[in-house]
Image (cartoon, rainbow, N blue to C red):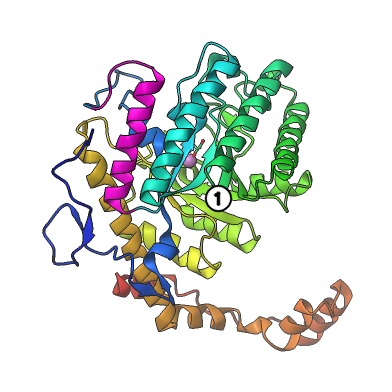
Amino acid sequence: MTAFPEIEKIRYEGPGSRNPFAFRYYDENEVVEGKSMKDHLRFSVVYWHTMRGGGADPFGPATAVRPWEDGTDSVENAINRVRVFFEIVEKLGAPYYAFHDRDVAPEGKTLSESNANLDRVVAALKEEQQRTGIKLLWGTANLFSNPRFMHGAATSCNADAFAYAASQVKKAMEATLELGGEGYVFWGGREGYQCLWNTDMKREIDHLARFMHMAVDYAKEIGFTGQFYFEPKPKEPTKHQYDFDAAACINFLRCYGLEDHIKLNLETNHATLAGHTMQHEIEYAGSQGFLGSIDANTGDLLLGWDTDQFPTDIYLTTQCMHAILKYGGLNPGGVNFDAKVRRESFEPIDLLHAHIGGMDAFARGLKIAAAIRADGRLAEIVRDRYASWDSGLGAEIEAGKHDFKSLEAAMLAQGEITPNKSGRQEMIENLINTYL
Ligand code: XUL
Ligand code: CO
């Protein structure tokens, strides 16, 4: 079936267009900094929110109307859903998608039944990829919904839960390989704690590292050469997740010798839950060589949970794209819309409006960020701000030519530091606004 017979492929019509089913900024062929927008942004649509999100919240059940669903948890229904999903991604003109094992195929009564269900759906995903040319940005496994993972998966106190999770990741990696996936994501799910009195934190974190090493080893064994990502999230559903933020994840990866194998998949709403901005997370990961991919969404600052809204704020997308361009872009990563329509936006067409808006917001962010960079005034201000490090004492310190004693001697001789200059924050913020 076709879910949107009345909607053609969404096309670029320019900023003046009044057509809600057109892009006003995302022109996939437009070249920005020597690369097409399509190659810069590498947009990806997620299966879980788009096809499996119904709008349930802690106060009420799903509201979404999805005429293609037959109401069963059958493999047939799952395969039909795959067809609808590819129609959506194709109409949006997004080159990538992402999924969890359990989003695409129903969990069976046994592990082998679940694996067989997944195989059948993967065959349909493969057919649709071949038909449309749409590619898999990354795959992952859902290690948090089933009650067996109530204490976590790789960090569970129950060794069998660890083993079951390993079996699931093994299979999800095989599915990702089969589909030519360009990456594989670990998001902690329930890898954290609710109460420290009953938690052996050291043991749990050691287990998480062992789990990831097993995945890295298995990738080598089966010839999966895609990029692994670790996705920070500070809390929810647990009180504390071990993948708290970029800094905590990088520390973990380096500490356990995983730094050559795993980069980060950063998500905006997770950044804000951690008390950071997404710009901070991208800057931190980028500066440490761990920028991999992003889950593009946004939270509601008036709500304390992960609302996973579509990003529409141009200032936010400008900050993201400025930091991304600074660190060389996303590849093999992408801009993955880990976002869902609001519970009140229950009609299928809202899925298109949401993605069109997100894609346009990121296209604008990209263009504005490129304009800031081309103009060069911001970079010049930052360069000037650090000019004391380019010659004299600063350059000598950076070159490793000093120690505490020689620096003390220099300051004793000088008596006081060269006067500080203003940080000019307000002037810079005004400057940024001139590009918007
Ligand atoms: C949950 C979340 C996940 C990961 C993949 O907050 O972001 O959907 O992106 O497991
Ligand atoms: Co995510």
Which residue shows up at 81% across the image and 82% down it? Answer: 412
- In-image side of 341 versus 226 (left or right): left
Residue 46 % position (x, y): 41, 41
Q: Nearer the viewer, residue 346 or 285?
A: 346
Whether residue 70 appears in magenta in the rendering, the answer is yes
- Mark 1 within 8 Å of ligand 1, using the beta carbon: no
Q: Quadrant of the C terminus?
A: bottom left
Q: Nearer the viewer, residue 399 or 91?
A: 91
The answer to whether residue 299 is above or below residue 260 is above
Q: Could one spot residue 158 in this view of the protein?
A: no
Q: Give the residue at the far right of this rendering.
A: 405
Q: Give the residue at the far left of this rendering.
A: 18
- In-image side of 11 versus 361 (left or right): left
Q: Nearer the viewer, residue 290 or 45?
A: 45
Residue 41, image quadrant? bottom left
The answer to whether residue 384 is above or below residue 113 is below
Q: Nearer the viewer, residue 367 or 42?
A: 42
- What residue does disc 1 label? 182
- In-image side of 234 versus 23 (left or right): right
